[in-house]
Amino acid sequence: MSQFDAIVIGGGVNGLVAGTLLSRRGKNVCIIEKSSRFGGMASYSVDGGPTLAHSLYNLSPRVLSDIGIDPQHPVLSGKPVSTVSLSEDGRHIVFKNEGIFWSEGAKHPESDAWTDLTQQLITYGGLLRQLAEAPPPGGQKAILSRGGLNELLRLAKLGIGLKKLGKSEMRRFLQVILSNVHDIVIDDLPEGPVAGMLAADAIWGSATGPRSPGTVFNLIYRLGHGGNITQPAGGMSALTDLMVEAAQKAGCVLMPETEVSRIVLHDDTVSGVATNNGRTLTAPIVLSNLAPRPTSRMTGPSAFDIEAMRRVRIIRARGTAAKVNLRLKDDATLPGLPSELAHERLIYAPSVEYVEAAFNPVKYRQMSKAPVIEAFKRQTADGANWLSTIVQYAPSDIEGSWTETAKEQLAQITVETLSRALPGLGDQISGIQVITPDQIESATGAPGGHWHHAEMSLDQLLTLRPANGMARYSMGPKGLFQCGAATHPGGDVMGLAGRNAALAALEAQA
Amino acid sequence: MTVENRYDVIVAGAGHNGLTAAAYLARAGMRVLVVEKNDWIGGAAVSRSLHDGWTYSNCSYVCSLLRREIARDLELPKYGLQVIPYEGGASFTRDGDYFAYYSDHNALKREMARHSAKDADAYRCYSQAIMRQCRFIRPFLLRDAPDPASLHPRDLGELAYLVKKAHGLGSRELGETLKFWTMSIGDVLDEHFENDLIKAHLAGSGIIGTGLGVYSPGTAYVLLHHYMGDIDGGIGAWGFARGGMGAISNAIAASFKDHGGTIHTGSGIEKILSKDGRVEGVALEDGKVFYAPVVASNMDIKRTILHHIDAAELPDDFTKAVRNFKIRGSSAKLNIALDRFPNFPAAPEHTSFLRGDLHVSQSLFELEKAYDDWKVGRWSEKPYIDMLIPSQIDPTMAPTGAHMMTVFVQYAPYALEVDGVRSAQNWGEKQRSAMAETVLDQMSAACPDIRERIVHMEVRSPLEIEREVGLTEGNIFQGELTFDQLFFNRPVPGWSQYNLPIEGLYLCGSSAHPGGGVMGAPGANAARAILRHETRHGRMKGYAA
């Protein structure tokens, strides 16, 4: 029997962050991971192919400093990539910080409108980041306690930030935040690949279409850390390696290839975990990087009151994103794309209406026949060239389940769709990996393979994330905390959920 | 300028909200003129006799939302308004069965259990949740929406009222409220129920009049918008106005005239006159000009601002916000004169539920697909239909033995797609009757002999509704009821309190808070705003606020 101060179940990004932060605050921490690799979706790959997550856009600098990683570390110093909205006529559109351009170099007529809109959303994102860097407001603390005062202070800061926007911008903020991306984009931009790219960026990883109210929030969430997209030098696994290193340096005990079979309780208080290899590890605090439902399975339902179990059961998490990795021939180039754009982020979303039409079938448990795609060309450690793509929409609960035929169909659809803008792409491909949401679920434990563990819809955000009454990381029995993407503020390779959870656990102990 | 053409207030449009505002102002002692483009009054709350012997409520068709405070203040029963509740409704399956909705709780529970025992148990929890939300929202309907960016004491006061109400719920219930308001009706129903037919029946109110699908977030609120009314204290109950929906407008108009009001029909507004940022009066299409220091527009915000006012008089960002206000046509209407009562083979004899709202949607997926058709500019292949035969309860609507049927159709786009072109102009005779055939096919699932019963039928696409009533795109709510267009965001941020950037110009229609439905609240709230502002500014000395 080993004794720890805290045990983290699940060594994904948030689990690593939570464990490392607790270690650095003097706790004796153990992080348990069922697979052989730490890093969760950020490091998961099949047969050495590209990882599930393939870019960074809102990694929190605050998290980095809290776990002792230098934001200037060579792995993180990759230069921002541009986004390219692919077009069937070969006139691709390149989105850069300084504006948008045709692939041949001339400025795009919608550049200014796009810049204005994006800058506005980035400003709003900056404001909301203050909320993301702390537990959600509305805790039932005594107002005059330290935590209560801190919360008041944060809300006051947000209020001042809003006021500083000026009256009309503040009003606009309160409208836009509740709106859908279709409307705000179409208000300012003509229908087409520029609008389509913005619509696509508002729906990644979620079971919503551009017309669904609340999608602007998703877009702002992406842009919350300034909107730059980077790739770590050495790929995403280099970043997770760095996090593992930070955890070790902080003194965490890392336990790969160990599965937790049960969270052990005594008198409604956590006393540790039992693993499937027969070990019992004790600790007064257990943080679960899993979503609430699998966590509740580890304690057994009797640890929760019936209403809490009902709320856990109805959390919506339908994964809709599949990972399709196209292995390219060794000397392959991307046809129809100027070579200087080959390593940028490629988006296929020719219009808002296209994205909405792609969304339709997923409502009825079908895959999109004409999906929205994000692609990166990259080289894996073994020197192989890949086109790493995220394909939406492909539902976790597809009708008739994800058979081999369905997977082949998805592979074919992906190649066909990309070939519309990159004609002849099919000839450059030597192999295809299809990783469906249900596969992601069984590999990572994320419900529905949903990369936020719970849908990022307005009714599952802030005080309602992951469910009403359990938004402040502690859950059910004393000493049990959630630290995964299902909690506030949500997922992506960001780390704030893990950080906030660790701080909440520390505070509860104090 | 003569005395004859000078008034204290001119109301543009004799819809029920315009008349409500006018009636309140007349009762406050003002000289009020209502101008109306049609030869008749009522806007979309109207009864029309388009086929000899039959009366159609040819736009809005049932009543529940009309605020009782307004009915009381304006003494509407005294002026002839009588609302008769109906007792139920049903959704028919395509294989000869039905789900009946009874207002009697025990009967409803037995009927639900016939389809699903689990759902019969779940209904109690569901209806309590809905009722709690209704109780929370009702007090806000006759109050102003605070401007969150303002430090004006009134705004702070309203904001404090909101916080107090929210705080009063307790943190658990507040969480549930926030969740409910932001969810889709499909998700809410999936959380509670398992039976497709029951879910489809209950979902209808979440999409009526709205350019959203049952799985779009925010439709749970739209459902609430249909449930927050009452008849004689029965919250959520719906009924028929005796004599059709026009009886409501007529009663308000009678109350208005009785207090000295004047109504001028038959000529619409050409222009709202203003000078140096101050309203002066209105010029009508027939060349008449009327003057008043205050003009209240019952037209929707787009029509008011973009068609009847000089753009130069308005700040650009305001005009832009109005242009971006979403008013989407999504509904059509069939009004049918029947030679006798149609046959509903599935229904037991002498059942009460045929007197209520009848539907033929089978599942939430079917409803969601109906929305997908609309998004690309087509009417739904299997539309949601809400059909009622009010002549069973109100015999004044049709000759003895004959009946009148009202059929509401969701979804039908304003800009109809034909041969790859989306345009409202595509709504010709051919397209309208093709849509009517689609609807009749749907209805045949419930009453197979419907086509033989038809004596006369009026088919109204969103274009007809726009042309006749004046509602932009034929949208029944004068603007989508989405979060970004509700409460302090309605109609546009910063202008949620009925006044507009031109001094003396007000909005009194359902583009304003709290939105559409035959509710009267925007009209009553606008009247209150007018009395408050104009007496304070001394333009109407002597009137009591």
Image (cartoon, rainbow, N blue to C red):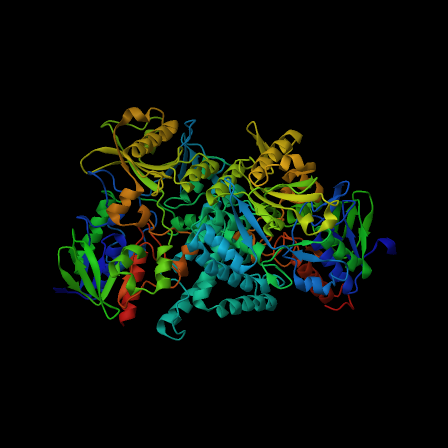
Residue B303 in the image: x percent, y percent?
67, 45
Quadrant in the picture for the N terminus of chain A: bottom left
- Total marks in image: 0
Name the side, left or right, on which A194 lies relative to A340: right
Q: Residue furthest left?
A: A1
Most foreground residue, A435 or A16: A435
Name the side, left or right, on which B366 lies relative to B236: left
Residue drawn at (40%, 43%), measured in percent from left and top? A201
Residue A208 in the image: x percent, y percent?
43, 45
Most foreground residue, A216 or A480: A480
Q: Is residue B457 above or below residue B228?
A: above
Can residue B184 be seen in the rendering of this structure?
Answer: no
Residue A444 in the image: x percent, y percent?
25, 48
Residue B476 in the image: x percent, y percent?
63, 47
Q: Residue furthest front?
A: B349
Most foreground residue, B283 or B228: B228
On the image, which quarter does residue B440 sit in?
Answer: top right
Can residue B318 be seen in the rendering of this structure?
Answer: yes
Q: Residue furthest bottom?
A: A144
Most foreground residue, B430 or A130: B430
Quadrant in the picture for the C terminus of chain A: bottom left
Q: Is residue A350 above or below residue A257?
A: above
Name the side, left or right, on which B436 lies relative to A18: right
